[in-house]
Amino acid sequence: DEINNLKIDKVIVGSDQVWNFELTDYDMNYFLPFVNSKNERVSFAASFGDINIINRNGKIIKKELEKYKKISIRELSSVNRLKEELQITAENVLDPVFLLDKKEWLKVANKKAENQKYILLYILHEESAYKIADKISNETGLNILIITQSRKKRINGKYIRNAGPEEFISLIANSEYVITDSFHGTALSIIFGKNLKVVLKKENLFLNERLMSILNLFNLEECIVNEESSIADLLQTTDYKDKEENINSEIEKTKKFISDVI
């Protein structure tokens, strides 16, 4: 209710990826330069993508972040490096998707669209995930549903090209397994308590920071697989029972950060 009463002055949209490690005028907008000095700046669940950007832009980043009242970041590694290299204090919080629980996300999802049990393969970059999905399918007899940006058909399965947010949530919620190299695919699978198989990227290694941070935080390193993983590891059920207390604690910590700054 408090958030609904806030006035939003500006919204920044677009990609925040800085592939060449150089900050442009466009990138500087993410430091909220349009906010008057008398106002307070707060960062919630930000992400550097690649923390190595501070190697070439440390002075600028330090100068801008010193203007913030509070800073929170999704990756613990980024929190630590800001402290060590720029003497900037930040808190580690969860991605905003964790602010809604399973029941609330199901309100967003479409009704179950598939009348079958299936493996959901959601891939952004790492093609080795196709082989992993094939292995699990061959052992379990489950069909594969594939959400990918690629137009190539690499394995037998149903390719879904038009999944919007509601369909995407529903496909994760109703799956037997989720195989993904995506941070948000991973996060939503954790929320729904899915049998999760995470494939780390072999290129653009900095993108693994987000994945490793959330898996380490929740002691879910067992979910990481690759082409060499045994069938036993690929079929292993993800056990969330002994992790629920930790997950709920981190969610409350994240909500408290929002409450404190508001």
Image: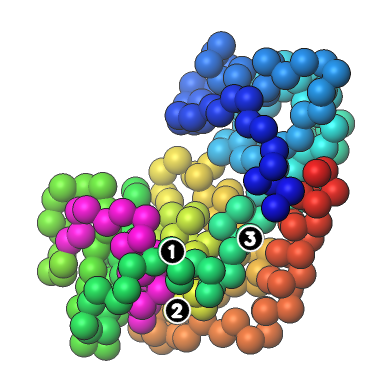
Mark 3 or mark 1, which has the lower sequence index? 3
- The amino acid at mark 1 is Val
What are the residue bounds of the magenta stretch? 159-178
Label 3, residues with CA under 10 Å away: few <14, some 14-19, many ≥20: some
Residue occupying image coordinates x 36% and y 60%? 166
Q: Is residue 151 left or right of residue 102?
A: left
Residue hosting label 3: 99
Q: Quadrant of the C terminus?
A: top right
Asked if residue 71 is positioned above or below residue 132 in the image, the reply reads: above
Asked where in the image residue 36 lies, by quadrant, the reply is top right
Mark 3 or mark 2, which has the lower sequence index? 3
Residue 13 rendering spot, x and y as whole percentages: 49, 30
Of circles 2 and 1, which is in front? 1
Residue hosting label 2: 195
Residue occupying image coordinates x 67% and y 33%? 7
Mark 2 or mark 1, which has the lower sequence index? 1
